[in-house]
């Protein structure tokens, strides 16, 4: 029987944990928050525990300071400790995928499976890094509106309904400026997870929208090819936020994957 030790205010508690299914830990992309997982929360919460945190600096979480991608991953491990979940199926979209891969690098024993959506393993190119620092200047001068303008039309495919685009603008606009700046710097500084891909030993699903304008679907093909046994799902017509744009296809792929994880 697993016996966990959980830090509390005056020491540690030892806890017997009887749950037989790893919770889903949904990690959002930039510059968003856990609200983007609404269709997945609705779809899966009846069958298992679903955790959708706002990363530090975003949504309702505390102000960032300067959290690195690795520190975000460590926060998630602490979150699992506090919520008494030994392992989770970590689902990361885009920046959330960078965090999910860092989570695997730093806490592999806490990971029951990985879903890597619209993401990549490599670090930023020089040009990509320069673009981040230009965006830091733009956000410093003009606020979060600068990043909303730059990303609004690229987060979803060209056929996405206007209501979804308006929803995304609303979610982006409410993100704290300092958190957005910290995340831009963190993504620019992030380490490559590519060397660790062949050593991933948990079941892995890679998902991309075929019309992703932010992270080339070729990155997802490369990710799936580098991770032993990984399955690749390409959702036709969907853009970067494939989970919101085509929730039916995303949830079907994730549901099938979770059944396989539960039986490993
Ligand atoms: C995201 O959607 O999280 C970002 O586009 C990732 C990035 O800028 O690299």
Image (cartoon, helix red, strand yellow):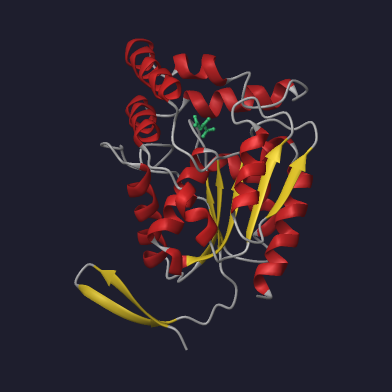
Circle count: 0
Question: Left or right: 155 with respect to 55?
Answer: right
x, y percent for residue 32? 50, 34
- Residue 64 location, quadrant: top left
Quadrant of res 257: bottom right
Rendering coords of residue 26 (x, y %): 55, 51
Which residue lies at the image location 53% right of the left edge and 14% below the top edge? 149
- Residue 77, picture quadrant: bottom left
In this view, 51 is above or below 155: below
Q: State left or right for residue 7 relative to residue 47.
A: left
Residue 262 visible in the shown view? yes
At 51% from the left edge and 19% from the top edge, which residue is drawn?
A: 148
Q: Nearer the viewer, residue 187 or 152?
A: 187
Residue 238 versus residue 255 in the image, above or below: above
- Of 16 and 158, nearer the camera is 158
User: Is 43 on the left-hand or right-hand side of 236?
Assistant: left
> Does residue 53 show up?
no
State the residue at coordinates (55%, 25%).
170
Q: Residue at x 67, y 35 (%)?
A: 217
**Residue 144 horizontal/vertical position (percent):** 42, 19
Estimate the x, y position of residue 55 in percent, counting from the top left.
42, 44
| Quadrant, the C terminus | bottom right
* Residue situated furthest bottom in the rendering: 1
């Amino acid at each position: 029987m697993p016996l966990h030790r959980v830090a509390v205010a005056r020491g540690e508690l030892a806890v017997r944990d009887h749950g037989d299914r790893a919770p889903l830990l949904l990690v959002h992309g930039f510059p968003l928050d856990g609200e983007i997982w609404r269709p997945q929360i609705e779809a899966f919460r009846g069958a298992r525990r679903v955790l959708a945190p706002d990363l530090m600096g975003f949504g309702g979480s505390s102000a960032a300071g300067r959290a690195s991608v690795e520190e975000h991953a460590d926060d998630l491990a602490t979150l699992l400790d506090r919520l008494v979940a030994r392992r989770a199926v970590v689902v990361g979209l885009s920046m959330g995928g960078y965090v999910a891969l860092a989570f695997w690098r730093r806490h592999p024993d806490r990971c029951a499976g990985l879903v890597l959506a619209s993401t990549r393993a490599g670090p930023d190119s020089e040009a990509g890094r320069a673009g981040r620092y230009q965006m830091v200047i733009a956000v410093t001068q003009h606020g979060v509106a600068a990043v909303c303008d730059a990303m609004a039309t690229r987060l979803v495919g060209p056929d996405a309904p206007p209501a979804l685009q308006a929803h995304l603008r609303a979610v982006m606009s409410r993100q704290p400026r300092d958190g957005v700046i910290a995340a831009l710097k963190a993504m620019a500084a992030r380490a490559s997870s590519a060397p660790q891909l062949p050593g991933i030993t948990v079941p892995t699903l890679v998902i991309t929208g075929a019309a992703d304008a932010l992270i080339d679907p070729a990155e997802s093909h490369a990710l799936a090819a580098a991770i032993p046994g990984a399955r690749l799902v390409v959702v036709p017509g969907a853009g970067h936020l494939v989970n919101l744009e085509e929730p039916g296809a995303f949830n079907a792929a994730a549901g099938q994957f979770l059944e396989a994880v539960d039986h490993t």
